[in-house]
Image: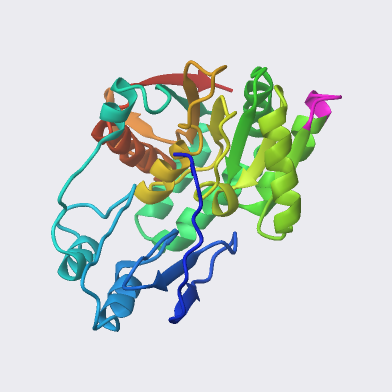
Amino acid sequence: MKIKSIKKIDYKDEVFNLRIKSEDGLNHNYIANGLNVANCHKMKANSIKTILQKCKHTHYTFGVSGTIPKPGTLDRLTLMSQTGPVVSEVGTRFLIDKGHITPVEIKVIKLNYAPEKIREAFFKASQSADSKRLYNIERDYIIENKQRLDFVCKTISTSKKNSLVLFHRVAYGKALYNKLRDLNRGREIYYVDGSTPTETREVYKRKMEQGDNVILVASYGTFSTGVSIRKIFSIFFTESYKSEVIVRQSIGRGLRKHHEKSKLLIIDFTDDFSLKRDGKVYFNNFMIRHMYERLKIYKDVELPYQIKSVNL
């Protein structure tokens, strides 16, 4: 979508600019001349409800979202109680078929590198340990594995077009950045997390729009939502997420069309610590369970995907 013109209007009433806490600092909600709520990335349904209930003299309320909560969820019901039911829904597949956004190809890479004794240890711990603690132990094991880091960075390095590399934890993001710089001498590689100044992020975005072989390593919190760069050809999910909002918004970073881009490639890395007995799986680790949740999302939005297992 492009702004074709801007018309200045004479408006003397109050304009409110509300902000919610976010890593990118860009989450503004503008309310003026009735009601218009915009740019509410990651805003919860209860927050929207609180705002709308205070707008007592509003004649019309409109809601537009790319990631509306799932049917049957409390967030969905809360939102519908304030805005009414969904009037029209336009899916990703429809927009691709009509030529409005870029076709998507998703490759899911299941990484097998954990020794049997480690898999068994995770399985035994799952029978008694606190799930949150076990989840964090699993994530620590993953980001500290050098084989995984080498494979992920070598895979990213095979891309010769602009690539967005998304990470969750800063320690892993910096490890990716340093390794990619070692493997790609002379290539433009930039790093962004929550501490990166807004002005610097804008410079990196311009460099990607103007360049052809740029790698931008960025945290999900700063670049999974609200960022518009046309010239992204590949997106790499280097750490696991199951949140539908984050997954769909992350894909959305590369959907804008560019005359040099025929498709968007998504590489989704996951870590397989599963165990089998008599050919049947009897244990799936957290990251594999997250992968299955992402596959449901890909299926729901009708994006084709392929799954490949790689032994490290």
Q: Is residue 285 visible?
A: no
Q: Hey, which quadrant is residue 150 in on the image?
A: top right
Quarter holding the N terminus is top left
Please give left or right for residue 278 compared with residue 212 in the image: left
What sort of colour scheme is used for the picture? rainbow
Q: Who's the residue at 66% across and 46% down the image?
A: 172
Q: Residue at x 17, y 64 (%)?
A: 80
Q: Quadrant of the C terminus?
A: top right
Residue 142 in percent (x, y) is at 58, 42
Asked if the stretch drawn in magenta spans residue 102, the answer is: no
Name the side, left or right, on which 199 lies relative to 79. Answer: right
Q: Residue at x 47, y 34 (%)?
A: 270
Q: Which contiguous range is marked in magenta?
A: 182-188
Q: Is residue 67 above or below residue 269?
A: below
Q: Position of residue 112 (x, y in %)?
A: 51, 27
Percent coordinates x, y for residue 107 in the rendering: 44, 22
**Quick check: is 184 in the magenta stretch?**
yes
The image quarter containing residue 82 is bottom left
User: Is residue 208 positioned above or below 18 on the image?
Assistant: above
Residue at the extreme right of the image, as rendered: 186
